Image (cartoon, rainbow, N blue to C red):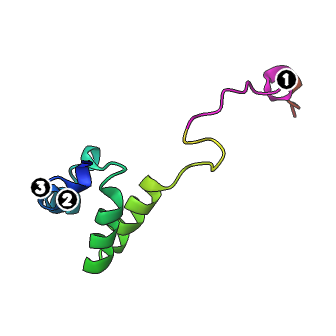
Amino acid sequence: MNDATKPGATEDVQEIYRLLKRGLGHDLVNDVNVFELIQIAARDGHKVLEQELREWQAPCDPNSSGLPSTIAPTRGFNREHVKHR
């Protein structure tokens, strides 16, 4: 049984949503509840909160799986190669 199907999960999402409207509870948003929170915000007309939640759930780069790059910068990005005016 996942978190979304547990008894009380809907009430928990409602409480998280109430906290988010007050600027709190961001740490309680997760992959399980973010889509329901987006739906609630859209239904209630809270465009800014809806957009913030959509940005939270969107991957930064579809190829990165949300992980930062481990590739070192190229040699062209150091002070020795910068044109000085």
Left or right of residue 59, residue 46 in this image: left
Which comes before the other along the chain, label 3 or label 2? 3
Asked if 59 appears above or below 77 in the picture, the reply is below
Left or right of residue 70, residue 26 in this image: left
Q: Overall secondary structure of the magenta stretch?
A: loop
* Viewer-proximal residue among 53 and 85: 53
Q: Which residue is disc 3 drawn over?
A: 7
Which comes before the other along the chain, label 1 or label 3? 3
Left or right of residue 80, residue 27 in this image: left
Q: In the image, what residue occupies the spot 22% across and 49% down?
A: 25
Start-end of magenta stretch: 67-80
Q: Residue 2 at x, y = what percent?
A: 27, 48
* Residue furthest top as drawn: 80
> CA separation, marks 3 and 2?
12 Å
Report the amino acid beneath label 2. Answer: Val
How many C-alpha atoms fall within 10 Å of the one at disc 3: few (<14), some, or many (≥20)? Answer: few
Which comes before the other along the chain, label 1 or label 2? 2
Q: Secondary structure at mark 2?
A: helix
Q: In the image, what residue occupies the spot 16% across and 62% down?
A: 10
Q: Which residue is disc 2 drawn over?
A: 13
Report the amino acid beneath label 3. Answer: Pro
* Viewer-proximal residue among 45 and 11: 11
> CA separation, marks 1 and 3?
56 Å
Report the amino acid beneath label 1. Answer: Arg
